[in-house]
Amino acid sequence: AKTELTVYTAIEAEDLKKYAARFNDVHPDIKINWVRDSTGIVTAKLLAEKDNPQADVVWGLAATSLMRLKNENMLASYKPAGYDQLSPKFRDNDEAPTWTGMDAWIAAVCYNTVESEKLGLPKPTSWADLTKPVYQGHIIMPNPNSSGTGFLDVSSWLQIFGEKEGWEYMDGLHKNISRYTHSGSKPCKLAASGETPIGISFAFRAAKSKASGAPLDLVFPKEGLGWEMEATAIIKGTDKLKAAQTLADWASSKEANELYNEGYAVVARPGIAKPIQYFPKDPESLMIDNDFEWSAGARDEILAEWQSRYDSKSEAK
Amino acid sequence: MSNQAYLELQNIHQMFGTHQALQDVSLNIQEGEFVCFLGPSGCGKTSLLRIIAGLDMPTSGEIFQAGNNITQTPIKHRDFGIVFQSYALFPNLNVADNIAYGLASQQFSRQEKHARVRELLATVGLSGSEGKYPAQLSGGQQQRVALARALATSPGLLLLDEPLSALDARVRSHLRQEIKQLQEKLGVTTIMVTHDQEEALTMADKIVVMNHGVIEQIGSPQNVYTHPSTPFVAEFVGEMNFFKAQHSGAGMMQSGALILQCNPGTETTFGDDVQLAIRPEDIRFNCRADAENTLEANVLHLEFLGSRVRSLLQIDSHETPIIADISMNEMSGLNLAQGQSIRCQLPADRLHIFGGQA
Amino acid sequence: MSNQAYLELQNIHQMFGTHQALQDVSLNIQEGEFVCFLGPSGCGKTSLLRIIAGLDMPTSGEIFQAGNNITQTPIKHRDFGIVFQSYALFPNLNVADNIAYGLASQQFSRQEKHARVRELLATVGLSGSEGKYPAQLSGGQQQRVALARALATSPGLLLLDEPLSALDARVRSHLRQEIKQLQEKLGVTTIMVTHDQEEALTMADKIVVMNHGVIEQIGSPQNVYTHPSTPFVAEFVGEMNFFKAQHSGAGMMQSGALILQCNPGTETTFGDDVQLAIRPEDIRFNCRADAENTLEANVLHLEFLGSRVRSLLQIDSHETPIIADISMNEMSGLNLAQGQSIRCQLPADRLHIFGGQA
Amino acid sequence: MNQSNTATTEPSQHNTAQRLFSNLFGRRSLDEWSLGSVLIIGVLALFICVVLPIYTLLSKSVENRAGDFIALTNFSQFFATPSLYNSINNSLFIALLSTTIVTSLSFLTAYGISRTRIPFKGLFRTILVLPILAPSLLPAISLVYLFGNQGIIKELLMGESIYGPIGIIIGSCFWTFPHALMIMLTALANTDARLYESAEVLGASPIRTFFTVTLPAAKYGIISVAFVVFTLVITDFGVPKVIGGQFNVLATDIYKQVIGQQNFEMGATVSVILLLPAILTFLTDRWLQRKQSALLTSKAVPWTAPKRQWLDRVFLGLMLLVSFIILSIILMAVYASLVTFWPYNLSLSLKNYNFDLMDGGGWAAYWNSIQMATFTAIIGTGFIFFQSYLVAKLPGFKVLKWFFHLFAILPLAVPGLVLGLAYIFFFNSPNNPLNGIYGTMTILVVCTISHFYTVCHLTATTALKQIDGEFESVSASLKVPQIKTFWRVTLPVCMPAVLDIASYLFVNAMTTVSAVVFLYSYNTSLASVAVLNMDDAGDIAPAAAMAVMIMLTCMLARLVHWLLGNVLLKNTQTWRKK
Ligand SMILES: Nc1ncnc2c1ncn2[C@@H]1O[C@H](COP(=O)(O)OP(=O)(O)OP(=O)(O)O)[C@@H](O)[C@H]1O
Ligand SMILES: Nc1ncnc2c1ncn2[C@@H]1O[C@H](COP(=O)(O)OP(=O)(O)OP(=O)(O)O)[C@@H](O)[C@H]1O
Ligand SMILES: [Fe+3]
Ligand SMILES: [Mg+2]
Ligand SMILES: [Mg+2]
């Protein structure tokens, strides 16, 4: 009989079928039951279910979230086949690794050419540009408290500009923000539909929206891009450990990395990635040297600070 | 018509769709009179009262008050107070506010209103209840508040739609007297609707008996009881035994094998089919042998009713038995028993004659 | 206690919380008897009936049927049919199904049921109404269906809770006779609850008068009416005038300035305070001058009640006037008028004496 | 008559203990005992599904993450965080303003329907209650298309942003309006022509009559509406989530605390704070209801409106306006769901109905919703009606019934969001033997039934109360088991109420978000939650499409209800005819 695995994921909904199908090409005896939600919700769900886990595997969730789960001692340690071939950035540098990186998901700014023209907004080229007064009320970004993308933005600015200047930067940016959304892809979708001329989001979403016909330009600010890893892990205590390991093995295989590359410019296995439409030629050079340990550790502090500074936007009105 | 009448209805008709609720109703009411509309449910009493109040317009006919045609006069220019069947007190206003409701529109000062309310409450015997709400009052008390409210503006005409029907028997007979006394004291012309004959008999100066939208008889209580002009009135006001009979000679009626002597009066001629009628209490038992209209009857059944005994008497030549009421006092002399045969009399002066069949 | 009694209640008490609804009620009912529980609203009649039916449990006391203690017997082992005040007909079942409702559980064939329903409908005079629904029947017809349903299982005991109170006066007096006749025909022991004294007087073999949860008197209708054992019974069953008086000698009672001769019987001694009572219809007017207990009275008010006139008489030495009823026949000889003075008699054999004050 | 001898004989000596024993046991037949045990099961079920979860939630609010008791630390932290406790102000502001608007508007429209002579009353009524068939997210999404930055009539806002209090208030008013209207219609249906006639006879002007007769009679209805709307708005999080922008309210705070920050304890704390106004509202409403029943008289004569030309015209205008607004909002959502790519490609297509390519669970979520709603309607109706029946008609078991009633009323005071969170805490606890139902369809059905229990219970109880209380006594005297009377009489007579309950449960199960948003799992995602998630992910048009699907399904359910009620019942309920 088929083994059924309950897999929690934050991979875009439209790609789930593809992922499962590719996996089943190789392992037809394992059926994947997806539980798909945005990063925050999946993480919350996993934590809520801590005492009684429902998931067997997490495939495609922000690495910082997985680190959090690791701290809660919820992940089984497993070193998938070919683990050592992955770039070190994509590895849990622990004795007994618990998570395995898949691909990188990088920040980007979605710029709606039609609406910007109407409003006379120049195309920004850097993060710093976004604090200019012209953009006042025209920028939407995700709320780091609920969105993984939002958090990677905030943590990258703190790393790019330094802690103090980072917060000063955000103070300036905050003046131009019309609202913070709960999901990371929403700012780009809103930019695509003209609800806002500029949305801070991530590259994968931006490229997809542009491909589906939206009048978008992708902007990759020159100071460097925050990024986050999608990663895979096995939940501790699963009663289908064997199948779970099979999936984890495949998730770091070459085929899988080719699959990730269909949407993501940077993947865990070096030398696999081919350029992707609308992406810069060498995305890795734009990616900052992200310190995940730091950002995972300081997460609660950063979020609390962010919340006390910006989370009551509406009162200004 | 006479100009002395306080209120005069002329040929009132009322149609509801195809249903004729009132048919050619004409009526005079004198000032200060207490008039009862009496009739079975659905006979049109309320309809008539509403027309007099101006709440409904009659399909045709006219109403005159002191000689003026008021058929078209709007309610607010008419001068009457009304108590509805179930009082219709404002549940959200207390007793004082209910009573003073009609005073507001007449520019009374606060104190005047106060005084008037107190006076009215005293009149209806509810002093001190100003602050209570209708829900806190018993049925009888609510009824009195409704009365006080209707009287507050000192209307020339008081209309009461079955004011007592919602109350229980004891409260009812008590309030009957009170209303009557109040009316006499104030001298206000009053029309009361009722379907209870006893109520009408005890309270009214004039009874208007109605049936199927038509007035059957108008008269004093005594007159209506002792000289009902139709079989309907005879049966509705009190109880009545009926026999079919035929005019068989001057003042003689033949019913079955019986030949009964009757007081002349009704105009019937030989061979006419008539109905004879007699009230149960008018049948005599202690009668001399030579008295008129005596007959032998068989006692079928005796029913004890407290102050009197109701007997069911079978008369030879008649199919349906007749009812006779015997007071307990008379009974003690008679020693009647079931199954016994007895001689009784249908006194000629107590026989009613109605032409035609029922 | 006697074993012949069909039903025997011994010292029944019933408490609802702190409210004592029944207090030490004991009662024997013979087979085939028609018993009425009579009393004012809230006196505990329904409570007692429900205890007999087994619908409620008494707080204490026992019930015996044919000598067997059935106090604890579950309803389904008791043998009675019951008709509720509201009839409680099943609105969605037609007449036939309603009547046959209790037959189902007793393994009757379809045809037997059919036959039984038809028989019962004939008994209550509703043949041919099998297919109608309760909403299509008049109140009186519904009542009969409820009766038929209760009779369907041929119960040994029939319980009726104010079966007539929801009906209008005319239907009521008609059904009274029907129920009584049916009961006589079937010979079924019957208990009926009512607050209408006339109903109880005309229908019952035995009346149980109740007040405040206590039995005041048990007796035949005549007995209860003519020999009420307490002032409450005297006043509740029929009307009664009361005077305060004092025993002032052998068979003599003094009330105000009046000295009245009374039939001996009640044990009172000199100086005892008593209540004298007389029914309005027992006061005589055509009395010889030498008769006992005559007195002069002033006619305050006359009220026409149809078959009789109610007079309000003021007696010199008494504050509250007394009521006397005069039949119309007697009245025609008397020619009484308001304000007139008249000589009347309170016959000694009609005076009731109750010890103690009211 | 001779059957009397077969009556079981018991020893004639009874001591008190024995009597007590037989009072408790001996006299109950097997029949009554089995029904009694069903009642006991019912009380237990409600205890487990309502009381225990809420208790667990309350205890969470005074615990820290590790589960230690920390008294009110969470609360002081809440009040120390300005952004959190600002939400209280925001919530109150939104709720009070919406309450004022909805109460007055629903009074006016209800007046128009029941007290004027305007034409097309039935049509207006149908249109005005339409919003009840849509999830509360639908108006919010629709508002984005109407007043958003690309909205077709955004100029009407004169530069104000729809994302914020304005949007929340319009959206809240839209979806709470039918609830208010229905209460208001019942309140105003209570006319008493006699009072109007009395007022007229006593010379009162129309204005005075309005203030002394019309308004007082509707007073409790109006207060009741105000409280209901207040609770609905303050506990709703769908609308503020979609259109609230950065305007935080308590309900979204809970969501953010739990989903965004995985801070369950603070979520529980905010839930408790949200529970307070709801409970206060609930208690006041109960108290008012009791007061009102004392005022109602049974002899009222229905009042028919006289012709008042200008008044009728004004009301016709109002009805047209309100109907127009409601229809616009609904039709905007429908239109938006059909537009290929708003606003750059306005050609119509069904692309947005291709839910399988979106977040939220795809078409499977829609079918799950239907399945969930069907189970809720069938199981819920069966359970609720039968339990209400036992409470109303089974003799004895007084204490048990008292508790049952208490438990049945409780859910009314518990906002769905709070209930959902309580369910996580309670059912997902590993030492709860029932934790197997966590993440299954069962827990969704159980939670939805619990969430909407009270109204159904009251509907059933009202219907049962109208049935003669002596039916059971009659059956007992005829020796027919009570359950048979239930089948043959009680159930058929109450059929209209049963259908009402089923339809109410179905529609609410289709549209509810708040209670289930924490509880669904991969194979039980629901359409209403999908709307939220799609909107969350920026797929606004597909979200509109799913909301439209839900609304159409509810309309279909109502149509089926109507057909059953009018066609089927008419044939089986011939007995109602005179
Ligand atoms: N507004 C109306 N529309 C149609 N029919 C009406 C209306 N009002 C009264 N009727 C009918 O007219 C007839 C007389 O009604 P009315 O109320 O005057 O009777 P009533 O004598 O007062 O009876 P009750 O003693 O029952 O009050 C009845 O058959 C009634 O059904
Ligand atoms: N289940 C109960 N709980 C509490 N009190 C009750 C209950 N049943 C009856 N009572 C009270 O017991 C008293 C007697 O009630 P019961 O119904 O026997 O009166 P009744 O004589 O039948 O009156 P009615 O003529 O009004 O039907 C009343 O005061 C009533 O309020
Ligand atoms: Fe809810
Ligand atoms: Mg009438
Ligand atoms: Mg009773």
Image (tube, coloured by chain):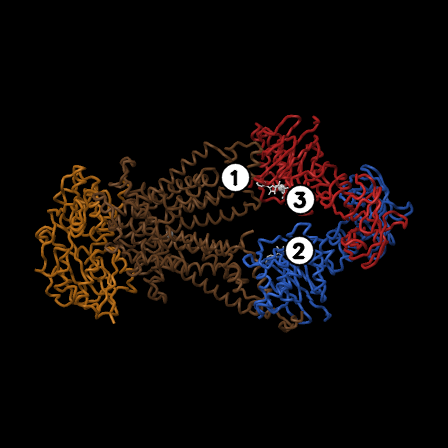
Chain colours: A orange, B red, C blue, D brown
Question: Most extreme residue toward the front, as rendered?
Answer: B271
Q: Where is residue D343 in the image (x, y as percent from the top left)?
A: 22, 43
Pointer 1: residues within 10 angstroms few (<14), some, or many (20+)?
few
Viewer-closest of B267 and A118: B267
Q: Name the residue under label 3.
A: B40
- Of the residues tagged 2 and 3, which is closer to the observer? 3
Kind of element beneath mark 1: loop
Q: Which mark is residue C43?
A: 2
Q: Do the residues labelled 1 and 3 touch (CB within 8 Å)?
A: no
Q: Which mark is residue D48?
A: none
Q: Does residue C160 appear left or right of residue B340 in this picture?
A: left
**Where ligand 5 lies, by quadrant?**
bottom right
Res D573 visible: yes
Q: Mark 1 points at which residue?
A: D304
Kind of element beneath mark 3: loop
- Labels 2 and 3 share a subunit: no
Q: What residue type is labelled 3?
A: Pro
Q: Position of residue D578 (x, y in %)?
A: 56, 51
